[in-house]
Amino acid sequence: MATAKIKQKVKNNMTFDPSSIELKWQAKWESEGTYQPDLDAANGRGNLQTGLAKKSKSFYNLMMFPYPSAEGLHVGSMYAFGGVDVFGRFKRMQGHQVFEPIGLDGFGIHSENHAIKTNTHPIEHAERTQKNFYRQLHAIGNSYAWENKLETYDPEYYRWTQWLFVQLFKSGLAYKKYSPVNFCPSCKTVLSDEQVIDGKCERCNSVVEKRDLEQWFFRIAQYAERLLGNIEKLDWTEKVKLAQRNWIGKKEGINITYQISGIQQTVTIFTTRPDTNFGATFIALAPEHDLVTKILDGAFTTDPQIAKKIQIYVEKAKSKSEIERQAEGKEKTGVFTGLYATNPLTGYQMPVWVSDFVLGGFGTGALVGVPGHDKRDFEFATKFGLEIIRVVVGKDGDESSIVKIEQVQEEEGTMINSGFLNGLDIHKAIEKIMDYIEKEGYGRRVVTYHLRDWLISRQRYWGPPIPMIHCDACAKRRPKVLIIHGIAGDSNDNWFPWVRPLLEAKGYEVIIPDLPNSQHPTLAEWTNALSKLGITKQDNLSIIGHSLGGPTAVAFIRKNKIPVTKLILVAPVGKEIGEANWEAIPNGGYEFVKPILQRFSEANGYVSEIAEIVENTVLYLSDDDPYIPTTVSKSYEALQPKVTIFKNHGHFNAGAGILEFPTILNEFPQVEEENLGWVPVPEKDLPVKLPYIENFKPLGTGKAPLANHPEFYETTCPRCGGKANRETDVSDTFLDSSWYFLRYLATDLKEVAFPMPAEKAAKLHSATKDEIKKAEKRRAWLPITSYIGGAEHSVLHLLYSRFITMALKDMGYVDFEEPFSRFYAHGLIIKDGAKMSKSKGNIINPDDYIRKYGADALRTYLLFLGPFNQGGDFRDSGIDGMSRFLKRVWSLLNKWQMINDKCQMNEERLRFMHQTIKGVTDDMENLRFNTAIAKLMTWYNFLAKQTLISKEEKEVYLKMLAPFAPHMTEELWQQFFRNPKSEIRNPKFNSIHTSEWPTYDEKYLQVDKVTIAVQVNGKLRGTLVVSVADKDNQKLLEELARNDEHVAKFLSEKVKKVILVPGKILNFVM
RNA sequence: GCGGGCGUGGUGAAAUGGUAGACACGCAAGGUUUAGGACCUUGUGGCCGUAAGGCUGUGGGGGUUCAAGUCCCUUCGCCCGCACCA
């Protein structure tokens, strides 16, 4: 009896009980800051290739942050996060400084819909889910830098989301415009093109409608070419790169303009196949096409019967949703307009039709029909009895006229019936006809993209209010550009006459005064003259000051206290003038200029006074300016200017041959008519807080819930102080997540958005010196070293993030174009062969499994399922097995009596260990977690057979298992490899997770015997075990093989040849 | 329709062109235990055979090669992305 009790006691002691140790270590790691890197001590940029050679490199290990749903953390997220964490832990043990942050993407329609469904207010919903998510995220034992967590709905976060919006607006990348947009009748909001899947809402699956609404857009389409070009350079999952390429959808073709017969009107179409133009027999217009509108407006006389028909058709088409238009599928419909267009190549009179199979949003919204070589055109032509002409002969050699759809020839081929193109293959024909069309002036080569501008506004409640204010009074004023000339100058000098019409074309009002007494001016005289121009504080003013116009601008701004959006100083006079080359000055030189400069030098003292009201300063200098040295930038330091030094631009004047100055135009974005009157909320007033309102539910009227709250939207214009209204739409969730990876690095910096150059941070409203310093230092963590997430974000999140980063690069906030050097798409966890969903009732709650098996078993099990990019099917029996494995490891390494310093490892054991180190390290590096675990299991099976286990084996084993099972290995590590006394000497906690990853030694990998497979005609007939020295000895091996009975049986006299693969195969060929 | 990926035991899966099925799950037999979602041993692709061993085998067909799960062609099936994109 007594023995049984003792046995029981020993057993209990040895049983692995996860729940008792997991919380303990999680708390310890957090209190010790085990996973909290010193962000200000970044040590060079991380790189996946550095490995062990370069230690302590900062490694930004990013995973896609989750949106917190009511159901709690999905086991699929746990899988993804677990894999990323294992990689991060591995990198940390390899000596990297790993930064692994986490947060919640809790703003947006998805979270709001959850709240509506559960009948809770989104704010309460967020509070509840946040608590639950953070609890779960702790429970899985990932090595998060908890101090840097963030939530997108936190005002401290969305303050900067709004700031980002304002920056885009100021750079001309945001505009508000009426256009046909996707509207989800169930979510009661607009959606971006990317959020419409098969004509249905990505979130709720409702059929999406088209509505004409005024919406905010970001000019992502302007970045199409760069977004496309950079894809080449990215170390990303190929699949995702392809999805992005397809989404950007670059197409090279030609716009051809056709004359409409009998009236003064043309129609332009886009085509990628101009080679088939000799076979063009009709034109089809989208119902939205301008020409159709003109017909309906009665712009030219048409048969009233026809006009009526068109009207009915167009109205019907517009009322159809995208999906209905597609559902009607192949059955083409259309109405003839009564008009004909002339094909300039053939003189053919092509009837002009209206049809809804033509997409308004693609190309020019019109197409030229070539029914012989496009199936859709063929269907249309046969339905309405239009002529079909063959112009290409394909591989099949069929030259007959095309009467069946199977004959429609869309592929490679040779031209016929096409005049000067006859006999050419289609590619050569395309080039030739394009050259011809351009030469004759019928058209021009163009590039089109599928990518549309990013629709950013949402008529919902749960998002960051768009930080814009609309002022009716300001809407009546155009932004002004005041150009101030220099000494002896006037409004017709230099490049001023050149730039005036160009700026006007961009929508600016340009003022170039002729200043008095320009040969011998005084500062006061000029400042007074400018003050009489009637420019007020309400004007959205930019100033270009050339030469002496520079200090004049400063004095003018100071005197009138007029806020300036952009101050562009071109070779401005400053204090540093003494270093100039005075010999070069004509008309008496220095003696003439000196008194004038003295009179203007007063303005030098004003520079710092105007810094507050000048938003942006740009300084253009030239390396060969005879009067203004490049050191003049010191005079304007207080304005934190962006300095550009040109080559050979002299004094930027006519004398230096500068009569045109294109660079300066880049400083002035096109003024959107719709944007007039929109004033961004000043930085100091951010965030525009989302107020708590009772009725937060979407209205469905095309307006957001905040539009019912005058106490929110009624405000004053920041520019003119008059009555104005706030924008009541909120921004798209994807804006929140398009920059979160930047914010993680600055969650403790209240007044700085993210790491950025010191001069940029200094421009922020009230950043402290310390924050500016940190912002500058932390840039070393960027761009992200490794990003791992779901492939479902291939086009949405990843494309938007790339765009935002590119825009920030152009604004000078970051110094890289691509945020994610490497992106890896993990697989999905399914259950019983199907995606987990609430409706199927097959949702796995990680909590249950952590409670039952522990986080270690769940983590390891999920990663053992299969390759990390493939995901897997979750099965209870599988996790059972993993739990048993960990328990076996636990009891093996927990047996005190087996751990022995004196245990001598023989060659075999050393080889096994070093081989495992090699294999596991390699697998980890390539995210092959399943095979890494398998190798650890194999080694366990080997160790379990030994009577004693060496300390080294245990240490190495625990270390390699540590990324997978962090709690259990920490417990064993602390038990065995930590002298209890050492705690007194060294109070520092030495976690296994900051210990060094084991390395292997080649010398232990050497084997003395190899097994060689003996084949006869490629079939295995036996094996030979020989010493390594003999692995190349074909003669010996052949002899040994022939002496093997089994092998000999299969060998005849006529062996043709024998192939030896040293160390592997000996193959007899007969 | 276009583009991409994948098809290997009862299951999840391994395999730089070189001994297919490592490692697990499951199952079977045996042992151990008061009991066990525990532990240990052995076996486990299929067919034939008591066994030794043989034949066969990576969706189907063909090819390249001394040698193919792996490379090429073709075909079938499944999954994902895009889609009346001119």
Image: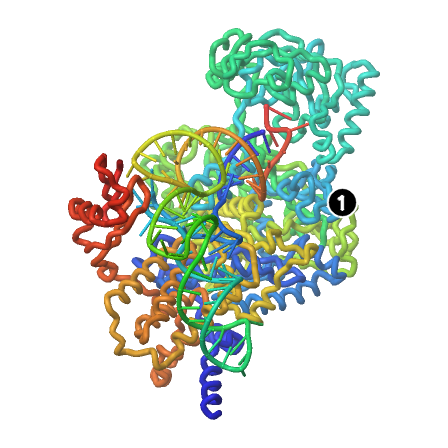
Does dot 1 land on a helix, a strand or a loop?
Answer: loop
Determine if residue A548 is in view.
yes
Front-most of residues A806 and A190: A190
The reply, left or right, for residue A746 in relation to residue A987 is right
| Outermost residue toward the bottom in this view | A2
Looking at the image, is A43 positioned above or below residue A176?
below
Where does residue A38 sit, x and y in percent of width and height?
42, 66
Asked if residue A602 shows in the view, the reply is no
Residue A621 is situated, as x and y percent measured from the top left of the image, at 41, 41
Look at the picture and state if A657 lies above or below B44.
above
The crowd level at tag 1 (other Cα within 10 Å; few <14, some 14-19, many 20+) is some
Q: Quadrant of residue A658?
A: top left
A910 relative to A866, above or below: below
Quadrant in which residue A183 is drawn = top right
Residue located at (43% from left, 32% from top): A653
Amino acid type at image mark 1:
Pro
Instruction: Classify residue A113 as left or right of residue A163.
Output: right
Q: Is residue A628 left or right of residue A68?
A: left
Q: Along the line of sight, which residue is nearer the eye, A288 or A879?
A: A879
Image coordinates of residue A12 in percent, x first then y, are 48, 82
Instruction: Identify the residue at image location x=37%, y=37%.
Output: A625
Q: Position of residue A72 (x, y in %)?
A: 63, 63
Residue lying at 76% horizontally and 33% vertically, measured from the top left:
A320
In which quadrant will I find the C terminus of chain A? top left
Label 1 resides on the chain identified as A
- Residue corresponding to mark 1: A185
> Which residue is more in the foreground, A412 or A571?
A412
Front residue of A536/A292: it is: A292
